[in-house]
Image: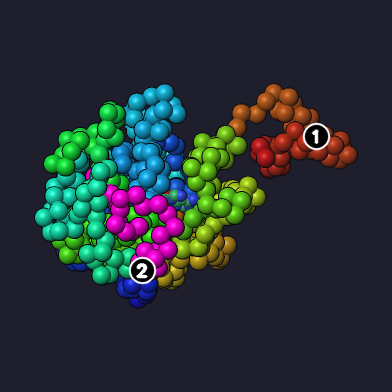
Amino acid sequence: MPAPLTLYDNYTRTLRRFEPLDPAGPVGVYTCGPTVYDYQHIGNFRTFLFEDILKRVLRWNGYAVRHVMNVTDVGHLTSDADTGEDKMEKGARRTGKTAWEIAQLYTDDFRENLARLNIEDATVLCRATDHIREQIEFIADLERNGYTYTTSDGVYFDTARQPDYGHLARLDVHGLDAGRRVDVGEKRRPTDFALWKFSPPGQQRQMEWDSPWGRGFPGWHIECSAMAQKYLGDYFDIHCGGEDHIPVHHTNEIAQTEARVGTRLANFWMHGYFLLLDNAKMAKSAGEFLRVQSLQERGYDPLVYRYLCLTAHYRTQMSFSWDAMDAAATALDRMRNGVYALRAEPPAAPDAGSVARFTGELNDDLNVPRALAVAWDVLRGDLPAPAKRATLVKFDEVLGLGLAGWVPREVPVPPEIRALADARAAARRARQWSDADRLRAELAAAGWDMEDQPEGYRLKAR
Ligand code: AMP
Ligand code: ZN
């Protein structure tokens, strides 16, 4: 019997055995989705890949999964401290399109890249702007329960009302209060946050709605609490996001939900750690960032990036480098060719011992790097070929590298290369070894390897 599934919960800061809240129903998973004011970068996709692996591991353990992901298309301000501009309106100005147009453009791009990385779609993908009514109702309940106050620019959540506010991040609320280095405007405390922001007087925003408090737009955090509750209920199994969400966004989601229904929203709080570029968090706001398309322009299959992410545990930061991409490309190529070479093997059952080892690693808080090492052991080991293939194809249900269906890309051979190869084959037949060697070197310099076979030869682009 492999070990039961254990996951690291950031709320309790412990590794905990995972047991579904509802043994009969699907496991409820909510993951914070993209803010669609710009393209998503490969750092964002590292977090989405971690969440994809989580879902696959849950299913590997026999659970059905109901996955809800939001699309933030309003209300995320350029500063997490509720100041600055709405990222969507700023993005609209940058591109010369409307906020609605860029939301659609970047959502489409996001979804195309999910497919390129073999990340499965959410069961429900929900937009903040489609759930304004639910957010207003949420805020009205908070007001009724006495958790809000109004300033000249919006309705705020009063964090002083909650003795355990900030538990997730272990925030030192009093220290923050005493420090007060940041200008908090009319907020009573630095940790208080906007639930509803008023449209600036005399200005028409592209995205604004009427509410009991005045015309305006919802704060960023309220959308996730409202949509998570709508689609998954008051208390569900697992909530995920990137590590940057711990101190503000998730802390505030928990605060709001506790104030409305008395739960901390989810049983497990899990976070993907950053992808770093030049020792700093890869960030859209930092200007230069890499997209999946940037990798493709350099000739990488997007699944090479998926493989690269599998080599680091989700709770460690990972530095991006082109050398690491090259190493991942070589490894993925070897693994794919290894499975391809077994394609003619008759169907067989996966090897039970290897499956148990693989499960043991996955169930140890998603230790995918070690699970990947088990896959390599199987590929290089001495299991009978049919069992070897069946085991690796089974592992791919979690790895998602498309191993079963992969075929080597047929690169068209240019006529001059074909002529060189024919000349070399003729030289070999005539036992003119030095000519044959010279022609092989010419082919190699042109980027082609020639493999001699009993009946002729095979050309492989490097
Ligand atoms: P955003 O589009 O900024 O709302 O972010 C989408 C997701 O990507 C969130 O879960 C973020 O926490 C996560 N994220 C942002 N930057 C990075 C990064 N450099 N590495 C990993 N995840 C990130
Ligand atoms: Zn969220």
Residue 370, above or below 428: below
Distance between the alpha carbons at the discs numbered 2 and 1: 72 Å
- Residue 120 position, x and y percent, is 35, 47
- Mark 1 or mark 2, which is nearer the start of the sequence? 2
What residue is rendered at 24% in x and 55% in y?
Answer: 157
Q: For residue 339, which numbered disc appears in the image?
A: none
What residue is rendered at 24% in x and 58% in y?
Answer: 158
Q: For residue 442, which numbered disc appears in the image?
A: 1
Q: Nearer the viewer, residue 91 or 130?
A: 91
Residue 443 is inside the magenta segment: no
- Residue 166 position, x and y percent, is 33, 65
Total label count?
A: 2
Secondary structure at badge 2 equals: helix
The residue that disc 2 covers is: 174
Q: Quadrant of residue 257?
A: bottom left
* Amino acid type, label 2: His
Q: Is residue 45 visible?
A: yes
**Magenta-tinted stretch:** 172-197
